[in-house]
Amino acid sequence: MSDPTTEAASPANDDNPAVRRLADWDADRLQAIAREHDTPLYVVDLDRVRENCARLRDAFPDADVRYAVKAHTGQAVLETVREAGLDAECASAGELDRVLAAGFPGDRVHYTAVNPPARDLDYAVSAWNEEPGLTVTVGAADTLDRLAERGYDGRVCVRVNPGVGAGHHEKVRTGADVKFGVPYDRATQVVREADERFEVVGIHAHAGSGIDAGQLDSHRELVSRMGDLARSLVTPDDAGAATDDAAATTDDAEPVDLEYVDVGGGFGVPYEESDPPLDLAAVADATRSALGPVPRVDGDGTEVTLAVEPGRYVVADAGLLLTRVNTVKPTAEETVVGVDAGMTDLLRPAMYDAYHPIRNLSGGDRDEIPVTVAGPICESADVFSTKRPLATPERGDVLAIGIAGAYGYEMASQYNSRPRPAEVALEDDDARVVRRRETLADLTEVER
Ligand code: LLP
């Protein structure tokens, strides 16, 4: 559970705005950092990570807030999030290894196993032997059998496919995708059977990633379905609790002592300058009222805890990618600006047609012209913007690509035999390298 000893969080205010836009960053400082550490270069501001954690804890004071570490697994970020009191949600053995190394105790670690490779399950079970407070979230009955075969009888959460998806792109709407979770109409049975062999502590669902205010109805629908399912599990004799067959119960069923209902992450961030920030308080209110009361079994009137697991929201606006202009090519309709970062450094535009704001830090008060910002990879998808107004770029200018702290470095690759960029972390007035730039030698290091 989230660390209750951490200082109370502060609400969004002038010192902690709901979003940090690209225009809010200090252009001179960023240019100096680019000169010192070269480009392409990721920058992550740990103070902003801390602010984002604080706003989440403030909006969900009674909930367990779990950082989905897949958004950014850098050690400095993980340590900051741990100190800020959030739990960690992991998707692989590698992520588990990283959060344990960052000092998260087992009872703040949640491993969501999606078709887990044997190697990952082996790792999770050995980690559990050391840290028995760890929880494994499973999305298939098969995974329960595979855990039992390895001697695991610890804490289990059952991931349910809620049949409701949402998110910024069809590729990230997991909630309606059969790949994820036990089908809703089988969930009751799977949970009950699991409870005979393991300590079932929760149920889980995740609608998708990048949910904006316009998709809150889907979020509400998911949460309400999870509330119904939870009530039917904790009070199986209460005929009124289940609202449909999916949550229906069998005769003589034992109540399942759920600790929490995890309704996933997916809180969107405003990538476009004109997008409003998410009203976190409104999302929290909608979540709580859609869930409704779920009593703890033998809990003296206490309630099952709500859990949320945002990734993007914690780090997106805390990070950006600095890149230098190397080629300026006028064409009839636009100017193509070649930069030294590409889809290997920031994949989101190529993969999801995602919008990231771009600012010419060296542009001063030059006129804006329509430019296409393109990387050095031999693929047409390797562009960061098309015909977008930008202060007239010149060779050597430094551009900042904003809201790149989430799923930025994490999805970077060495395609085209490109070493991955370095990363600098900011904290107060300090700037330190937290990931060194890869070298050409790193590219061939694993070859035999
Ligand atoms: N929980 C689970 C089980 C998840 O699968 C995810 C994200 C999250 C939480 C956190 O979602 P978030 O709050 O970050 O939206 N690469 C894509 C995003 C894929 C997210 C996958 N799962 C992107 O760059 O937009």
Image (cartoon, rainbow, N blue to C red):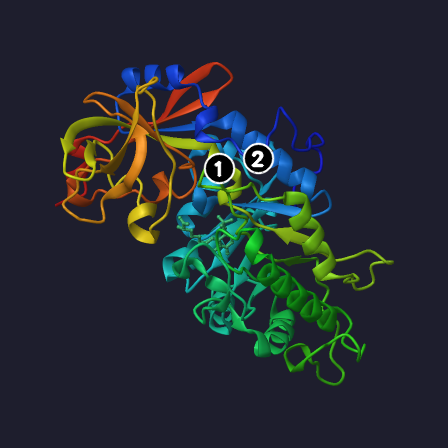
| Lateral position of residue 441 relative to residue 134, left or right | left
254 to the left or right of 143: right
Element on which disc 2 rests: helix
Nearest to the observer: residue 16 or residue 415: 16
Q: Residue at x 36, y 40 (%)?
A: 408
Mark 2–mark 1 CB contact (< 8 Å): yes
| For residue 11, side relative to residue 212 (left or right) | right
Residue 315's label in the rendered image is 1
Give the secondary structure at mark 1: helix
CB at disc 2 and ligand 1 closer than 8 Å: no
**Residue 239 picture quarter:** bottom right
Give the answer, above or below, for where 281 lies relative to 23. Answer: below
Residue 343 appears in view:
no
Q: Mark 2 highlights which residue?
A: 52
* Residue type at tag 1: Val
For badge 2, the amino acid type reads Asn
Please state the horizontal and vertical placement of residue 112, each as a whole percent of the image. Answer: 50, 57
